[in-house]
Image: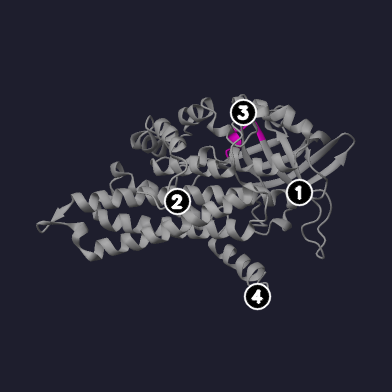
């Protein structure tokens, strides 16, 4: 089932072909053992799908964000989880738009080939939380290098990456212009490990999600690692954030279709009191309402992606796509669990695993309440709440 005429059927079939080799049992085993899906990521890399946004001139597929979103949607619709590798797509929002020709030439071909992984985005800090302008990590100029010092939380996939984008403050915060003075760096994590100037501690969560606390202890980064202009990094990560919101909306949509497919199949097959449970309106109507919400979110995802691909402002659309998709997937997660009843808690059905995974979209990478605050102030013109 699909909400709109499908322009990407060949792409969907290609991703489904890969995902078929990694069924529910594969993801259940990883979830139980808290392991990274190395084989799956290697397969996606080998076939060039993680280089979808890298231009063909640098060895990538040269696709739009729209197609990248379809790739991630299909991973989730198959019952998998793209969190293991999705950052290699959304980091391109900052690197491709604001990186220098020298940086692109030096790094993109090796990322596209799979020689290097860029899957870590090191921005959030425990004290600052969602107020990115309040981060305390500093980058101090010292000759031909910057010296980075500070603590980051929720830096996902840093142990599985060779490169990371790191946001740090290069000048003190100015309350009259809170976003000024933040700079974005492309950091070679291999060099950081060799220097001994980075310390990583895993954070255990309710789902199989590789995320870490990272301490930068006088890490020297050459000036060639600075993305764009010093002090303008916040502006650059906005492109990364918009891409991230759109791509994660697609993942939530994929989850929503998975829950809907599972629930409708079970509601048709499960017979109680001599009739399929899907014949009961108490089962059917919530699924129909969830379908409507999911279809609407799907349209907003494609609208936001089209704006991003055209180089147009897309902040409201990207945030609305994330909001609507996260809500739709969570509604369908609950409806699916209701349909399965006690069986939904049985690990072998995968419902409880996907239930835990899709709950993340309500709070990360941006919470629903922050999106509502953004829309009420930026779009509706209401007084700023923070």
Question: Which residue does the numbered mark 1 point to in the structure image?
Answer: 233
Tell me if residue 351 comes above or below residue 18 in the rendering. below
Asked if the stretch drawn in magenta spans residue 249, the answer is: no
| Number of other residues with Cα within 10 Å of mark 2, as a class: few under 14, some 14 to 19, many 20 or more | many
| Residue occupying image coordinates x 57% and y 38% | 157
User: What is the span of residues highlighted in magenta in the rendered image?
Assistant: 157-163
The location of residue 141, given as percent across then percent down, is 86, 41
Task: Say which element carries label 2.
Answer: helix
Question: Which residue does the numbered mark 3 point to in the structure image?
Answer: 112
Task: Say which element carries label 1.
Answer: helix
N-term-proximal mark, 2 vs 3: 3
The location of residue 333, given as percent across then percent down, is 37, 55
Give how far apart the Cα atoms at labels 3 and 1 are.
Answer: 24 Å
| Residue occupying image coordinates x 62% and y 24% | 115
Give how far apart the Cα atoms at labels 1 and 2 are.
Answer: 30 Å
Looking at the rendered image, the disc whose residue lies closer to the viewer, 1 or 2, is: 2
Please count the marks in the image. 4
Task: Say which element carries label 4.
Answer: loop
Give how far apart the Cα atoms at labels 2 and 3 are.
Answer: 26 Å
Image coloring type: one colour
Tag 3–tag 1 contact (CB < 8 Å): no
Question: Which residue does the numbered mark 2 point to in the structure image?
Answer: 253
Task: Say which element carries label 3.
Answer: helix
Question: Which residue does the numbered mark 4 point to in the structure image?
Answer: 382
N-term-proximal mark, 4 vs 2: 2
Horizontal arrangement in the rendering, residue 197 relative to residue 11 (left or right): right
Tell me if residue 357 comes above or below residue 288 in the rendering. above
The location of residue 386, given as percent across then percent down, is 67, 69
Looking at the rendered image, the disc whose residue lies closer to the viewer, 4 or 1, is: 4
Residue 211 seen by the camera: yes
């Amino acid at each position: 089932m699909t909400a709109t005429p499908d322009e990407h059927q060949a792409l969907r079939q290609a991703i489904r072909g890969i995902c078929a080799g990694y069924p529910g049992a594969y993801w259940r085993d990883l979830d139980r053992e808290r392991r990274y899906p190395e084989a799956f990521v290697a397969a996606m890399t080998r076939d060039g799908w993680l280089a979808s946004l890298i231009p063909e001139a640098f060895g990538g597929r040269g696709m739009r964000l729209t197609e990248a979103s379809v790739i991630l949607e299909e991973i989730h619709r198959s019952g998998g989880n793209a969190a293991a590798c999705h950052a290699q797509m959304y980091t391109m929002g900052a690197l491709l738009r604001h990186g220098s020709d020298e940086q692109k030439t030096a790094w993109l071909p090796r990322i596209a080939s799979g020689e290097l992984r860029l899957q870590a985005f090191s921005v959030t800090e425990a004290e600052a939380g969602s107020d990115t302008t309040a981060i305390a990590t500093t980058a101090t100029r010292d000759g031909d290098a910057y010296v980075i010092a500070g603590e980051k939380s929720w830096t996902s996939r840093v142990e599985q990456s060779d490169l990371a984008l790191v946001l740090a403050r290069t000048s003190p915060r100015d309350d009259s212009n809170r976003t000024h003075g933040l700079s974005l760096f492309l950091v070679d994590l291999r060099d950081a490990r060799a220097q001994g100037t980075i310390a990583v501690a895993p954070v255990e969560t309710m789902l199989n999600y590789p995320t870490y606390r990272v301490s930068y202890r006088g890490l020297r980064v050459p000036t060639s690692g600075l993305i764009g202009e010093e002090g303008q990094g916040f502006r650059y990560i906005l492109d990364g954030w918009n891409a991230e919101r759109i791509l994660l909306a697609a993942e939530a949509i994929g989850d929503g279709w998975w829950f809907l497919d599972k629930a409708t199949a079970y509601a048709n097959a499960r017979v109680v009191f001599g009739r399929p449970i899907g014949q009961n309106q108490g089962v059917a109507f919530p699924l129909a309402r969830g379908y409507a919400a999911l279809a609407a979110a799907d349209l907003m995802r494609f609208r936001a992606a089209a704006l991003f691909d055209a180089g147009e402002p897309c902040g409201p659309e990207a945030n609305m796509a994330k909001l609507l998709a996260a809500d739709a997937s969570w509604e369908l997660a609950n409806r699916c669990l209701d349909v399965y009843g006690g069986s939904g808690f049985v690990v072998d059905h995968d419902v409880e695993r996907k239930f835990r995974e899709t709950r993340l979209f309500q709070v990360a990478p941006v919470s629903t309440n922050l999106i509502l605050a953004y829309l009420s102030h930026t779009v509706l013109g209401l007084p700023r709440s923070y």
